[in-house]
Image (cartoon, helix red, strand yellow):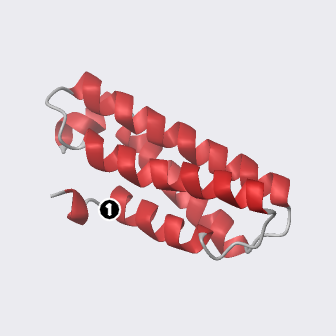
């Protein structure tokens, strides 16, 4: 089920694109850990029985995305396409955090 989940697919694509980023080792490591956290929390959240529990995981995923965006800002020399993908992913996750959106899915 979660493999057809659009936000999850975007998160996996984002992680793969982050693997290509050139950055100091400590920053790239942090970026990849945060990027993987996005996909993992979205996947885990899909199986939670209540809206409140799902929202908790979706908010954690959103926090991890913000961490990635901060790491990308610190790195400074990033592909604009990756920034656009991060913005698109952020909008997608933000919509999931709205309880009305979760009930509809």
Locate residue 52: give its quadrant: top left
Does residue 12 appear to the left or right of 103 in the view shown? right
Q: How many marks do you count on the picture?
A: 1
- Residue 81: percent from left, percent from top: 65, 74
- Residue 44: percent from left, percent from top: 28, 43
Q: Residue at x 57, y 47 (%)?
A: 65
Does residue 81 appear to the left or right of 90 in the view shown? right
Foreground of the two, 39 or 23: 23
Foreground of the two, 54 or 101: 54
Q: Residue at x 76, y 62 (%)?
A: 25
- Residue 27: percent from left, percent from top: 75, 55
- Residue 64: percent from left, percent from top: 55, 43
Q: Which residue is mark 1?
A: 6
| SS state under label 1 | helix
For disc 1, the neighbor class at 10 Å (few under 14, some 14 to 19, many from 20) is few
Q: Residue at x 44, y 60 (%)?
A: 11
Q: Residue at x 76, y 73 (%)?
A: 22
- Quarter that holds the N terminus: bottom left
């Amino acid at each position: 089920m979660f493999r057809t989940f659009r936000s999850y697919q975007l998160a996996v694509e984002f992680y793969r694109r982050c693997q290509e980023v050139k950055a100091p080792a400590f920053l790239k490591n942090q970026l990849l850990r945060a990027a993987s956290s996005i996909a993992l929390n979205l996947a885990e959240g899909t199986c939670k029985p209540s809206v409140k529990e799902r929202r908790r995981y979706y908010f954690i995923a959103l926090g991890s995305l913000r961490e990635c965006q901060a790491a990308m800002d610190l790195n400074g020399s990033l592909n604009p396409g990756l920034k656009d993908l991060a913005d698109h992913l952020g909008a997608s996750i933000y919509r999931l955090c709205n309880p009305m959106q979760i009930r509809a899915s």
